Image: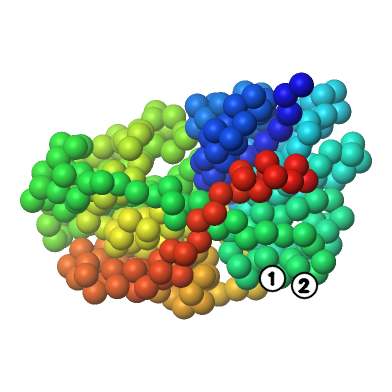
Amino acid sequence: MSRRIYIVAGEASGEAHAARLISALKQQQPSLCITGIGGEKMRAAGAEISIDFAELAVMGLVEVVKRYPKIKRIFNQVVAELRRQPPDLLILVDYPGFNLKLAKQAKKLDIKVLYYISPKIWAWRAGRIEQIKRDVDHMAVLFPFEQQLYEKAGVAATCVGHPLVDAVQSPLSKQTAKEKFSLDKETRVIGLFPGSRRSEISALLPVMLEAAERISQHHFPVNIVIPQAPGIDKAYLQQYLTDSPLPIQIIKDDFYDVIKACDAIVAASGTVTLEVALLGVPHFIVYRVSPWSYRILKRLVKIPYVGLCNIVTQQPVITELLQDEVTAVRLEQQLLALMTAPIASNMPMIFAVRYLKHWGRVVAQRIRQNWY
């Protein structure tokens, strides 16, 4: 009989990592039966999707509370699936608020659990490591310091490298990327990357647009590109753009080529900032949630940065604007700085990416060899 894997990815960046993992697993063992929570990328990689991850994607503590009844129903549905037809292995990808609870239920059902992409216990909620030790059979982590942290606590862990180091690539130059999307070569292109969750988009896209409009009105003309994240309808993005005088393209596919077409990018905090850094495009990071969520997070988070490049290097190599700093004027100033001195602004980013270049092993081989 074919081995069965159930895999859970609760948001867009995790789903992208899960899809790459599924592709590698299918290449090594085509007969594998893989089901779970995900989206189109996981489905295209060969998984059967029982629940769309868009039903779970939400950012911020207060926002999660508002969606809790729906999330709880989905959780109960997954537990029922695992009980009815236990898989050989449960793979949980990031999304710790949901997945750690699921690991606890899987343990009760005697299902082996591999956790891929660690909760940020080094940043906040360090006590989760005891729960992980109890309910997770093996941690597949992205950074060497995470492996050391887990091993010190007696948790089986392997650093498998960051998948984006191998995955992020585009053969296009900035000029050929602009041509691909019919963008004027002589006009600067600003990328507005407001995130992959509706709560992020509603908090960030309006102020991003206002900043871009200020640049167009007071400095020079610009073209705007906005990537359409998986699980987000174009109509949802379009509602924020109806009154904007700017030339704006919403682009669903070819994400890395979209990045290469940009002269500067303002991006919501998340995996996308590492993707932009790996492609060498000047950018800065913004993050804003509800005031109550921010007050709580500010007390809980134990590290000074939100951007991955800054966390890895332990230096502020990429500018971060957080909460009340996220204003149209501040975004305008930072975008202008990147577009008028892009080479100087880009150097710290290149330095940061060097910390990641030697990581790139595939977790799929480890799964095949061990079946934790």
Horizontally, residue 194 falls left or right of residue 142, namely left
Distance between the Cα atoms at labels 1 and 2? 6 Å
Q: Is residue 154 or residue 72 the one in the foreground?
A: 154
- SS for tag 2? helix
Q: Where is residue 341 in the image (x, y as percent from the top left)?
A: 19, 70
Q: In this view, does 47 lie to the left or right of 198?
A: right
Along the viewing direction, whichever of 340 and 117 lies nearer the viewer: 117
Q: Where is residue 318 in the image (x, y as percent from the top left)?
A: 39, 69
Residue 8 coordinates in the image, percent (x, y):
67, 38
Q: What number is the disc on residue 148? A: 1
- The image quadrant where one finds the N terminus is top right
Tell me which amino acid carries mark 2: Lys
Other-residue count near label 1 (Cα within 10 Å), few / some / many at <14 / 14–19 / ≥20: some
Depicted 34 relative to depicted 118: above or below? above
Q: What residue type is labelled 1?
A: Gln
Question: Where does label 2 land, which residue?
Answer: 152
Q: Which is more toward the observer, 291 or 370?
A: 370
Q: How is the image coloured?
A: rainbow
SS state under label 1? helix
Q: 363 above or below 291?
A: above
Residue visible at 29% across and 73% down? 347
Circle number at residue 68: none
Q: In this view, does 244 lie above or below 303?
A: above
Residue drawn at x 87%, y 55% is: 134
Q: Label 2 near label 1: C-beta < 8 Å?
A: yes
Relative depth, front residue between 246 and 8:
8
